[in-house]
Image (tube, rainbow, N blue to C red):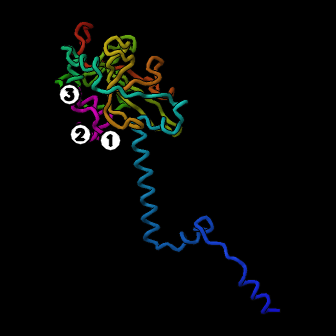
Amino acid sequence: MNAERNRRSESRPVAPVTSSDVDCRPCRSVLPLGRVLKRTISVFIGALLLGAVTAADVAPLEARSDARAGQIRVVPASDRLLRKAAEREDTLGRLLKAAQPTIGVPYKWGGTRMDKGVDCSNYTWQLYRSLGTEYDGFLSTMAMSRLQRANGLRKISFEEALPGDLLVYGHRDRVGRWRGHVVILVDKEGDITGHKGLVLGAHGASVGEVQYVTYTGFDKGYFKDPQMRLANVLRVAGTHQKTDLD
């Protein structure tokens, strides 16, 4: 009887083993301690870096669908009317000329290099500084959101905003961290370039570089997501003399 049972067992087909048949949990438990620690540290550092990037810019939008978070559209610097605007001799023309070599520079949280990688607040400050304006010191988006008058900047209303003014957006997330973004207004109504709500800045998230963009929410007081509300509008001293701002 045992011999018969053995013959039946030997004749039974054996299914091939695939990766889906293998439970890898025991494998992880026997990994060398050094490898486990290395993996843990890598994941931890990656999480910290991700948190740092999202905290400085508009990354909370990445967690939502485009339908909810809205849209952002890049307008190429080669746009005919945009290039024509750069020929102007006013503040806007000077800014657009100065911005030309920076288009496409990667966004980098905490970055200060206009040729290697820069974040939004460093970009606006350094671009204006290159023009010799009175915008004479770096300010974070949180500081700019509260500012009334300092560092060559002063608060104005959105209705007063002209090309070259700074639009500061931001909000606090569920755990109280500030998430902000600042851009330079290029064309409020679309009568200069044909692109209503056109701005210039170093954008994180889906853009990831210095670009001209339009976005959902411009005329409703937010940047792409209703949570990223317009917190302040600032003007650089000496940029619009006709309005007697200084």
**Residue 204 on image: x %, y %:** 38, 37
Depth-wise, is mark 3 or mark 2 nearer the camera? Answer: 2
Quadrant for the N terminus, please.
bottom right
The residue singled out by tag 3 in the image is: 129
Q: Residue at x 28, y 21 (%)?
A: 153
Which kind of residue does numbered mark 2 sit on? Arg
Q: Residue at x 36, y 38 (%)?
A: 208
Of callouts 3 and 2, which one flags the residue occurring earlier in the amino acid sequence? 2
Give the SS element for disc 1: loop
Magenta residues span 98-127
Q: Residue at x 46, y 61 (%)?
A: 40
In the displayed structure, does residue 175 sit left or right of residue 214? Answer: right
Which kind of residue does numbered mark 3 sit on? Arg
Name the residue nearer the viewer: 148 or 158: 158
The residue singled out by tag 1 in the image is: 108
Rate crowding at label 3 as few (under 14), some (14 to 19) or many (20 or more) other CA atoms within 10 Å: some
